Image: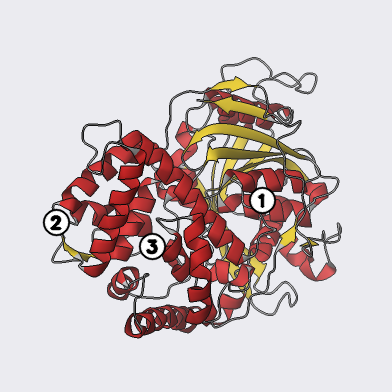
Amino acid sequence: MRVFGRRVRAAAALLAAGLLAVPASGCSAGPSDSTGLDASVAVGVTPLEPLPAAVPDALAPYYAQRLVWQPCDGGFECTTFRVPMDYDLPGDGDLTLSAARAAAVPGESGAQSAPGAAPGAGADARLGSLLLNPGGPGGSAIEYLEAVARTYDRSVRARYDLVGVDPRGVGRSNPVSCLSGERMDAFTAVDLEPGDQRAIDALVAADKEFADGCSRQAGAALGHLSTVEAARDMDVLRALLGDERLNFVGKSYGTFLGATYAGLFPSRVGRVVLDGAMDPALDSMAGNRTQAGGFETAWAAFAKDCAKHEDCPLGRTEQQVGEQLTALLTAVHAHPLPSTDNGRRLTGSQATAGVIQAMYADFLWPRLRSALTVARAGDGTGLLKLSDEYYGRGADGSYPNLMFANTAVNCLDLPAPFSSPEDVQRAVPDFERASPHFGRDMAWMALTCAYWPVRATGAPHTIRAAGAAPIVVVGTTRDPATPYDWARSLAGQLESGRLLTYDGDGHTAYGRHSTCVDGAVNHFLLTGEAPEQGRRCDR
């Protein structure tokens, strides 16, 4: 997910581990309207304008580099390439980005030529490179590639080199670092439901410490980690890979990256899939609020399921489950729970993070029931472990770069939703209406960007990508992190958008063992034939 405020999504780790799996799905006709799209355009939101098709002379040296691939990481190949830190001042300081690839495996598909293939093209005719991005922002595309390449669809693997490039500021590409593990422990534990001025001051101090740490350690690069710049970096890599058009599968925030690329370079769009879509027309206030609503929708699905299980510790009806969660979180905010993890205590904010972590995938629901059971008995260990997974905390107390890059990119891409604690206090009622269980926390966590040391360079915008090849936008109806309405909106903005709906739970859909979604996406990647508008896949 792309979190507009402070928290970072955990889905990249789940996807990289190959754990996001749901029962196979069937396909059905589209939704009740003719397309399923939300074609409304936000008033006053400007469109993203494409860049000139010709490569500027000043950028020509970057597009003329030669990639040197070296064996790495047990069967993969790795390389590096240079991009300008500032595209307005090429040559005045560069960044070095890292990429990895899994070369195509001809003969692996075991299939006949796909329908729509060019005459004489065999089933294994190479189609070029397919770039993958797991989202974040801050998720390492290299780590994701290396985790999923061997389990990717065989027909796709036979036709494409799978490529992951860590965006600027992420993973192996000039990674941003902000705080030590010890200080991150304090940051994740700070009260996100401050009840008095002392608690508000502590939250503000934590946000300022985080921002100051990023500024000290990242330097000038902190002002050049935007999604627009990352999209331009992808175009450099596309050219260096020898591809006329970019083929891309992006999940969660990766959809924003891919859609931004399409908006900037519509004539260079190849076969692009955007799964778990974001809506670029939303400002950060609306993004936070509607995302809170997405987690509330996922919680309702969990609560309904929990009430059916004998081991549900919160009640026998959906209403009882919700009421008891509120009571438990309130109690933990007031009195943190002990855990078995080296004397650490579970705070209310960490308890909320633990619950949110389990909303990403329904296979985590049994763990959440167990964690809630022991929490009600006074032991915070289960929820603390889920919270640690949410933030990416390692067993040694370290935190990944994902945490820092997430905030750095978000604070550049959109102006801060709040400029002061008083702004948050005024907004809390609206957030709580959108999400009674998570709204207050998600309002306060959005305060971080108010203290960011560099001014935002982006603003809400629509993306039309006029003239681009068909772009497949995948939306999940009960996605907690990227609400389904966001997918409908993005598909409606894109001139060539095709909405593919998965009626189910969890974050993103492709590669989660839905035969309907996987079949439609794989067919598109292999043939260029997008699914019909409004196609719907059911559980």
Quick check: can you spot residue 394? no
Q: Is mark 1 on a helix, strand or loop?
A: helix
Q: What element carries label 2?
A: loop
- Residue type at numbered disc 3: Pro
Mark 1 or 2, nearer chain start: 1
Mark 1 or 3, nearer chain start: 1
Residue 400: assigned label: 3
x, y percent for residue 204: 41, 81
Q: Determine the CA span between mark 1 and mark 3.
A: 24 Å
Mark 3 or 2, nearer chain start: 2
Q: Mark 2 points at which residue?
A: 378
Disc 2 packing (10 Å; few <14; some 14–19; many ≥20): some
- Residue type at numbered disc 1: Gly
In the picture, measured across the screen, residue 65 lies left or right of residue 58, that is left
Q: Residue at x 72, y 47 (%)?
A: 242
Q: Mark 1 points at which residue?
A: 258
Q: Which of marks 1 and 2 is in front?
A: 2
